Image: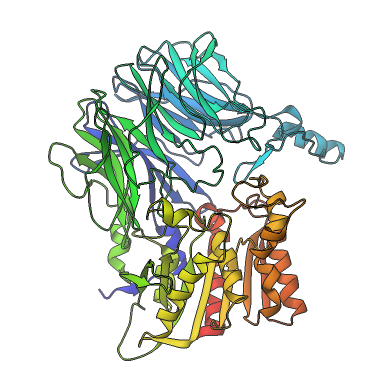
């Protein structure tokens, strides 16, 4: 049977797997499987796969289930389910069979994370209750009475978060539920913001929590600290760790140490510094950085539209002698480990792939993970430490039937010399029906972040453009993660300088390729990629058309309208309510008098990261300049991450707009 070109609709046929958790005995892996249903909803349910590849489904239904976690003896699975809309609960089921039992009866709200106690008797969970006036019941009552939606009132800058919406003064707290009785108790509610991490002590008698110690965490220099909390709620601060951001806190199995990810630069709000691995004695004392001699950042995700991108993950070996992590480098993500006594990162895998770490089996021999590459979406896999393979063994094949139907374009890797003596890492994908010596139109894709990376992961959007007959080019210019701290820090507070040098280098390379038509090139990107697209068209007319998606255009207004407010003289020199010289100089809109390139503008009205006013400025400027512009505004129910995790119909609409725009201008 001849293979066919990929279509926009194939995006909804791709199965996404996430959150792999190996059973204590190492015999099977629990994971979330996500599929789009016929009601325009992506539903997550729990499955297991054994080491022979046999898959078993554990939950079902539109309510979905996620964050599946094994009890310490493997006899039970706990999970979160939204079977009652807006009222997610914790459920427990026996691994020997039977129906799931609802463990909690929480009011309307949000559950963040769940963790079994090592003795299997309790589950700690983070939960944020919704204030009465913002519940579904209150909304229905107002509607019946003909009353208006109440105003949102806040005195805190932490009142909204993209993808999470507006929560005003509601905050997450940590609770513990008794598995036998279902009784819950509040244990800790002292975190000033919802960004915190926690873990159990191995004796099951206390937890460790890491959160900001500042009264104004949005504005003060970063100072996350560790707090030990007993089950009665008594807490004490662990003395010794330096100031700076911290997360993914994990107590060692022997109870002697606590590890976390972070760094000690309290003046780095945007993550330019390498995230490193730290360890401190459980009773306090000087913290020791175990990766200070490596130039790896331990929180590097490779961007894609068919995968989840978890935060940096670390997991202890059962003997407390080593810690396993994901290592992002040169567009790939590898599995690595650090010996606690010696320090330093050692890579276990190699190759052009991405690996996401889950957890380690009780005997310390197997690691649950996800693995994928540019031609295969991620699948559930196991890494056998006794064999030390270069690539984990994939256990599932959910997308294989679809892949067998498709003609795909395999990326070719490039390293290009820039005019100022550095190199930029790039990739090119030729059209799936490429024929020499024909010239093809080309699209340059620019990633968001900016401190993240493109690389060896399946990207439906890229494959779709290649199927439409375009050469697709993408790169990791300065500012990207995965190339060392200096590469990332090169654009700190200075966007549109060395990053533009790198992008322009890629553009010049494109213009000199025999298979690319230099007069038929387009440029596009989202978030910071939208920023750079705006910058590109305001500094060159070499692209025939452009697409700017959920962009930044004006750093002055962006600094006060994002859910991450910009603090004066930290990442950026100056401040949006005073000295705006540097912010304005680096703003693409300040240079828009030069723009002649037709632009498609895409943005979500519910975007709390890059407010839609950023695109409104672009659209208005282009219209006044009499430059062709089309503005597509997605509804308030969508968010900044719509292209990756938005409603299926909106994601398809977006792809349709992109395909039609390039067909109009580059065909």
Q: Is residue 179 visible?
A: no
Dividing the picture into quarters, in which one does residue 71 lie?
Answer: top left
For image coordinates 56% across by 55% down, the residue present is: 642
For image coordinates 33% across by 57% down, the residue present is: 330
Q: Is residue 482 visible?
A: yes
Q: Up-down: is 433 above or below 484? A: below
Left or right: 6 with respect to 403?
A: right
Left or right: 666 with respect to 171?
A: left
Farthest residue, direction front: 420
Dividing the picture into quarters, in which one does residue 184 lie?
Answer: top right
Q: Up-down: is 195 above or below 573? A: above
Front residue (pair 366, 10): 366
Residue 492 x/y as whole percent: 54, 54
Left or right: 268 with respect to 68?
A: right
For image coordinates 77% across by 50% down, the residue present is: 577
Front residue (pair 415, 325): 415
- Quarter holding the N terminus is bottom left
Front residue (pair 299, 653): 299
């Amino acid at each position: 049977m001849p293979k066919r070109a990929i279509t926009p609709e194939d995006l909804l046929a791709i199965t996404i797997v996430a959150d792999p958790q190996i059973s204590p005995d190492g015999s099977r892996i629990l994971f979330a499987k996500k599929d789009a249903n016929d009601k325009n909803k992506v539903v997550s349910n729990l499955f297991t796969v054994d080491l022979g590849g046999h898959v078993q489904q554990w939950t079902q239904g539109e309510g979905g289930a996620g964050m599946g976690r094994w009890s310490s003896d493997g006899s039970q699975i706990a999970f979160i389910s939204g079977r009652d809309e807006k009222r997610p609960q914790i459920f427990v089921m026996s691994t020997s069979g039977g129906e799931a039992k609802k463990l909690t009866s929480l009011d309307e709200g949000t559950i963040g994370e769940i963790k079994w106690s090592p003795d299997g008797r309790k589950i700690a969970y983070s939960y944020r209750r919704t204030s009465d006036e913002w519940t579904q019941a209150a909304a229905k009552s107002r509607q019946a009475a003909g009353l208006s939606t109440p105003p949102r009132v806040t005195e805190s800058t932490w009142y909204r978060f993209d993808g999470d919406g507006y929560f005003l003064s509601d905050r997450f707290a940590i609770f513990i539920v008794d598995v036998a009785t279902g009784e819950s108790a509040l244990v800790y509610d002292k975190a000033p913001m919802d960004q915190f991490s926690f873990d159990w002590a191995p004796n099951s008698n206390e937890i460790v929590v890491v959160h900001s110690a500042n009264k104004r965490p949005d504005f003060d220099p970063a100072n996350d600290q560790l707090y030990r909390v007993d089950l009665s709620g008594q807490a004490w601060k662990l003395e010794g760790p330096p100031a700076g951001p911290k997360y993914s806190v994990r107590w060692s199995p022997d109870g002697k140490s606590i590890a976390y990810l972070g760094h000690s630069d309290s003046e780095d709000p945007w993550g330019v510094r390498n995230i490193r691995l730290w360890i401190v004695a459980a009773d306090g004392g000087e913290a020791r950085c175990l990766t200070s001699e490596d130039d790896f950042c331990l929180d590097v995700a490779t961007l894609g539209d068919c995968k989840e991108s978890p935060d940096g993950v670390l997991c202890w070996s059962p003997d407390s002698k080593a810690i396993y992590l994901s290592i992002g480098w040169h567009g790939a993500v590898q599995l690595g480990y650090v010996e606690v006594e010696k320090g330093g990162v050692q890579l276990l895998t190699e190759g052009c792939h991405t690996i996401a770490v889950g957890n380690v089996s009780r005997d310390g021999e197997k690691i649950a993970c996800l693995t994928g590459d540019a031609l295969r979406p991620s699948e559930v896999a196991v890494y056998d430490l006794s064999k030390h393979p270069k690539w984990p063994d994939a256990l599932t094949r959910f997308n294989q039937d679809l892949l067998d139907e498709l003609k795909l374009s395999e990326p070719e890797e490039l390293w290009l010399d820039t005019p100022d003596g550095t190199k930029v890492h790039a990739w090119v994908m030729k059209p799936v029906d490429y024929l020499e010596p024909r010239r093809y139109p080309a699209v340059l894709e620019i990633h968001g972040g900016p401190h993240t990376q493109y690389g060896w992961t399946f990207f439906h959007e890229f494959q779709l453009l290649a199927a439409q007959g375009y050469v697709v080019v993408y790169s990791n210019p300065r500012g990207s993660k995965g190339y060392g701290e200096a590469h990332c820090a090169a654009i700190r507070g200075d966007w549109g300088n060395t990053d533009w040098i790198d992008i322009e280098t890629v553009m010049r390379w494109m213009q000199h390729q025999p298979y690319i038509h230099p007069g038929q090139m387009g440029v596009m990107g989202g978030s910071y990629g939208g920023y750079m697209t705006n910058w590109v068209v305001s500094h060159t007319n070499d692209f025939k058309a452009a697409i700017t998606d959920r962009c930044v255009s004006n750093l002055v207004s962006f600094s006060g309208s994002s859910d991450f407010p910009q603090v004066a003289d930290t990442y950026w020199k100056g401040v949006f309510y005073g000295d705006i010289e540097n912010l304005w100089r680096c703003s693409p809109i300040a240079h828009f008098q030069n723009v002649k390139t037709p632009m498609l503008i895409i943005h979500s009205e519910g975007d709390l990261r890059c407010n839609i006013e950023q695109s409104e400025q672009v659209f208005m400027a282009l219209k006044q300049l009499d430059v062709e512009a089309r503005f597509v505004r997605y509804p308030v129910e969508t968010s900044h991450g719509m292209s990756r995790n938005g409603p299926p119909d909106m994601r398809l609409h977006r792809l349709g707009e992109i395909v039609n725009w390039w067909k109009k201008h580059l065909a």
